[in-house]
């Protein structure tokens, strides 16, 4: 996104499960002026919830000493959401992207987080490094044009 024409916000909060709802509402409030319909706003809130929950449960293994960072940007063409942690990282991204795969079956996790993110957003990229954390970048186009996704 072109820096001069975008709006942005950043959040940094404790990796506590109770903060997932805060993250979801904060991003939705920031984006509330955009021409998103109710379904699109629900999809954005859902992907924020999924990514934040993954960071807390998998990235930090529920260690509340960690922090989750969210950066949200928008311009007239698209919304970009980046959710990062400095947790353990993902050992096998391709395996983690498979529907129903979870490393925490004892917590009754569905294993659908990445699948949901990919289906609800126009772009989803995962960058991870063992011992350093994970960064999820997601883009939702406001103008339906495939060339704007990149």
Image (spheres, grey):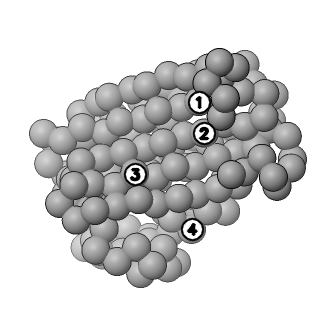
Tell us which disc is closer to us: 4 or 1: 1
Mark 3 secondary-structure assignment: strand
From the viewer's perspective, tell me whether residue 23 is left or right of residue 28.
Answer: left
Which residue bears the numbered disc 2? 80
Q: Secondary structure at mark 1?
A: strand
Residue under label 1: 73
Measured in 3D between alpha carbons, the distance from the residue under mark 4 to the one under mark 1, in whole angstroms, is 23 Å
State yes or no: discs 1 and 3 in contact (Cβ < 8 Å). no
Q: Nearer the viewer, mark 4 or mark 2?
A: 2
Q: Vertically, is 97 above or below 48?
A: below
Which residue is depicted at the point 37% across and 68% down? Answer: 109
- Quick one: quadrant of the N terminus? top right
Element assignment for label 2: strand
- Whether residue 38 appears in this view of the structure is no
Label pair 1/2, CB-CB below 8 angstroms: yes
Few, some or many residues within 10 Å of mark 1 (<14, 14–19, 20+) = many
Is 18 in front, or is 68?
Answer: 68
Report the residue marked by disc 3: 135
Where in the figure is residue 96, as x and y percent of width and height?
A: 41, 74
Residue 10 x %, y %: 43, 25
Distance from Cα at disc 3 to Cα at disc 4: 16 Å
| Figure check: 40 above or below 73 | below
| Location of residue 11 (image quadrant) | top left
Residue found 82% across the figure and 55% down from its top: 146
How far is mark 4 from mark 2, CA to CA?
18 Å
Question: Hey, which quadrant is residue 127 in on the image?
Answer: bottom left
Q: What label sits on residue 115 in the rendered view?
A: 4
């Amino acid at each position: 996104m072109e820096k001069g024409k975008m709006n942005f916000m950043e959040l940094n909060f404790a990796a506590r499960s109770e903060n997932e709802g805060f993250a979801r509402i904060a991003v939705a409030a920031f984006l509330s002026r955009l021409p998103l319909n109710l379904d699109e706003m629900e999809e954005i809130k859902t992907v924020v919830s999924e990514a934040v929950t993954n960071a807390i449960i998998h990235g930090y293994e529920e260690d509340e000493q960690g922090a989750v960072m969210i950066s949200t940007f928008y311009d007239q063409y698209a919304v970009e959401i980046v959710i990062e942690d400095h947790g353990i990282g993902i050992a096998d991204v391709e395996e983690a992207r498979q529907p129903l795969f979870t490393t925490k079956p004892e917590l009754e996790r569905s294993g659908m987080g990445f699948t949901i993110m990919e289906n609800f957003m126009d772009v989803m990229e995962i960058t991870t490094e063992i011992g350093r954390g994970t960064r999820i970048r997601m883009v939702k186009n406001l103008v339906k044009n495939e060339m704007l996704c990149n």
